[in-house]
Amino acid sequence: MIVLHNHHQGVRFVAFMLYIRSMKNIDNPQERIACLSRMLEEHNHNYYVLNAPTISDRDFDMLMQELQQLELEYPQYALPNSPTQRVGSDINRAFTQVSHIYPMLSLGNTYSIEEVAAFYERVKQGLGDAPFDIVGELKFDGTSISLIYENGRLLRAVTRGDGTMGDDVTRNVRTIRTIPLVLKGDDYPPFFEIRGEVLMPWSTFEKLNQEREQQEEPLFANPRNAAAGTLKLQNPAIVASRGLDAYLYYMLGDNLPCDNHYDNLQCARQWGFKVSDTMRVLHNLEEIKAFIDYWDVERRNLPVATDGIVLKVASKEQQEELGYTAKSPRWAIAYKFQAEEAVTRLNSVSFQVGRTGTVTPVANLEPVQLSGTVVRRASLHNEDIIRSLDLHIGDMVHVEKGGEIIPKITAVDVDSRPADSQPVVFVRNCPECGTPLVREEGEAAWFCPNSNHCAPQIKGRIEHFIARKAMNIDSLGTETVAQFYDRGMINNVADLYTLTVDDVAALKLQGRKWAQNIVDSIARSCEVPFARVLFALGIRFVGETVAKRLASSMKSMEQLRDATVEQLTAIPDIGERIAMSVVEYMNDIDNLLLIERLAQYGVQMRVEEKPESAPAENILNGASVVISGTFEHHSRDEYKALIERFGGRNVASVSGATQYLLAGANMGPAKLEKATRLGIKIISETEFLQMIGGK
Ligand code: IVH
C-alpha cells in the first residue's frame, strides 16, 4: 500500500480520530456493525478507486479487525455486502450458471486504420448523415464481467461464459476492492447492469509469477490468463489475495441517467465505480486517428495490459438505431495493436537446472530493444519447441513480448541462415553434474535424476525448504544458503539443524546476533506442522495442496513411506503421476536417511492428533483472551477455537477483566496501548502455542 505523506498524516489522523470519537458512543452491536461497514467501504473507495487514502493502512486494518470480530460474535447483524467479504471466506462451492439479461457480445476487430475509416463511414451512412460522436477507450486485456446492482447494492456478478449464460462468480468478485459493494449517492437507477473488465495489474502479475516460480507452480502466460484463472478459483480467500482490479466500460438498463455513453460512465464514477480517465469523446476521423497513434505508444507506460482501443458511438439512441449483427454491435469496433516484435540473432542456447532437476533451455540473443526494455534472453520452454522452430545457432529470430513473462521466439528467418550453421541440440547430460538426462513418457521436459548430488538441485531444494510457505526459516536467504553450501557447511536440509552459532558467526564480522537469529529460526521450524514439512521436502509434483491432501490421509511420514501407488491414488486429487513420484522418493535410501535425520532433530513427522470437541485440558482455566493482529501458524478462527478448547474464553475487546492479549503481527496500536496500561499479559503466538503444549 502507498505510504502517506507526512504533512498529510496529521490531518488524516485527526479525521480518523473524529470518526472514532463519533463511533465511540455506539454500543449497540448492530449499529456499530453498520457504521463500521459504511466507514470501511468509504475508505476502500478512497484508497482503491480515488488513489487517495485518508487513513493509514494500520488504522484501516484496526477498523476491519473490529468489524470482523463483531460479525463473528453477532453473525445475525453482518451485512451481506460487508467489507469483510472482500477478504473472502474459505467455503468451497462450484459456480452456478446464470443467464445474462442482455447477451454479452464480442466486438468486431481490426488491425488497420483503413478499416477504422470504413467503420466510421458505415456508421455515418447508417445514421443517415446525422451528426454523431465516438467515444474512444482503451481495450483492457483481462476477462469481462457483468455486474447487476439492485437498489445500489451488488446483487450478482457473472462471467461472459458463452455470451448467453455465464458463471455466477459473485463471491469472488466481492473480494475485488475496486468494485463497489454498495453505491455512493442516491441517483443511480434502482436496477441496472454494468459491464467491465477484471484484470491483474502488471506489478501484481509479476509478483504472482515470481512466487509461483519459487514454488515451481506453472506460470501464467499473461495478466489476462492470470485474471481469468483467478476469477474461477473456488476459494474466495485466495482470490482476495491475488489483487485483482476492474475497469467498468458499459452500462445497460432502462433508466440510465443520460443518453450519452460517456456521460453515463461519468455518473458511474460518481457512484463509486472505477472508470478509466483515458476515455475521450472524439468528433471526427482525425481525432480518432490521433487517439490511436497516441495510445499505440503510450500503452507501454500503463500499469495494466491493453491490447487495443475500442471505439463506440456515443449516443445510446444512435447505438440502438445501428443495432447488432449476430455476433457484435454495429456501433462499436476494436482496433488491436500489433504485438511488439523485434528481429535479432541467436548467439547460443544455455541449459538451466532447476530445483527438481528440470532442464530448461534459454536462448541467448544479441541484445535488442523491445517494448521499452532491452531483451537479451528468450524462453525456449522445451526440446519440442526447439525442434518445431528448427532453430540453428546464428539464426535471425523474431522475438515477441505480447504479455509473456519473458519474450519468446515466434519465428526463424530461414533465408538468412548461414550455410554452415549448426542446429541447436538439446543436451543429453546434465550441464552441471554430467549425469545422463531422463525424459519420462508424456512429459515435455528432460530432467537430471542425480537429485542428491547435483549442485543447483541441492541449493534449490534448501531454498525451497526454508521458504515462508514451507519451513518458514525467514532469517535465511538465498545468498546465505549459497555461502553455507559453497563452504561445505551444509549439503542438505538436515545439515541446517546442525549449524551452531559459532559456525554461522564465522561468515560475518561481528555477526553473533545475526547468527543467533538464524540458529533460533531454524530451531523454531520444528514447530511447523507435518503437511508443510512434506511440502518443504520438495518431492516432485507435491505442491502445497497435494502435501495437505497427503498429510490428512496418511497422517505420518512412516505411513507415507510404506504407501503403494494404489493406496496413494485412492486419495482424492492424487493421480498416478504424483503417486509414482512419492513412491520413487520414498524408495531412495538417501531420502530416507534425510527424513530420519530431520526426525531426530525434532521436525514434525506426523499430524498432530487433535481430540475433537471436548475441552482437551483446562490449561487456560477460564482466562479471557483477546486476539489481535495476524498470525503465522493458525488463522484467527483457529486460535479462537484453540482458546476455547483449552478452557479459555475469547473476547473481542481489551478490558480490566482480560487476562491475555494474544498479539500477532500488525496489531492495532490502540489495543496494545490499552493492554499495556491495564497491565494485561501480552503473549506472542509462539508463547501461546507453548502455553497450550505446542498444539
Ligand atoms: S465494450 C458490446 N469496451 O473486449 C460491446 N469491451 O472483444 C461490449 N474489452 O468482451 C464490450 N476493453 O471483454 C468494451 N473498453 C472496452 C473494453 C472491452 C476490453 C473486452 C471485453 C469484450 C471484448 C470484446
Image: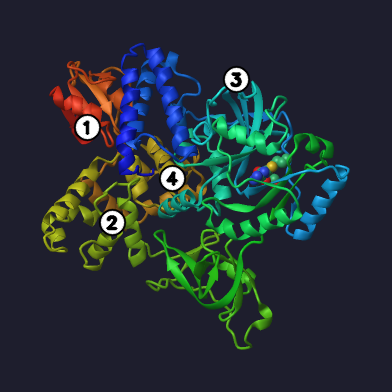
Three-letter code for the amino acid on which mark 1 is drawn: Leu
Q: Residue at x 52, y 68 (%)?
A: 378
Q: Nearer the viewer, mark 4 or mark 3?
A: 3
User: Where residue 320 is drawn, which disc sits there?
Assistant: none
Element at badge 4?
loop
Q: Which residue is mark 3?
A: 151
Dot 4 crowding, Cα within 10 Å, few <14, some 14–19, many 20+: some
Regarding mark 3 in the picture, which secondary structure is present there? loop
* Disc 2 residue type (three-letter): Gly
Circle 4 is placed at which residue position?
564
Considering only order in the chain, which callout, 1 or 4, is on the residue closer to the N terminus?
Answer: 4
Asked if residue 89 can be seen in this view, the reply is no
Between marks 2 and 4 in the image, the one whose residue lies nearer the viewer: 2
Within-10-Å neighbours for mark 2: few <14, some 14–19, many 20+: few
- Foreground mark, 3 or 1? 3
Residue drawn at the location 20% of the way across and 63% of the way down: 489
The amino acid pointed to by label 4 is Thr
Q: Is residue 175 left or right of residue 396?
A: left
Say which residue label 2 marks.
Answer: 477
> Residue 31 location in percent, x, y?
40, 14
Regarding residue 134, the answer to whether it shows in the image is yes
Residue 546 position within the rendered picture, expressed as x and y whole percent measured from the top left: 44, 43
Which of the numbered marks, if any, corresponds to residue 689?
1
Image: 618 above or below 110: above
Contact flag, marks 3 and 1 (Cβ < 8 Å):
no
Image quadrant holding the C terminus, namely top left
Residue located 54% across and 47% down the image: 226
Secondary element at tag 2:
loop
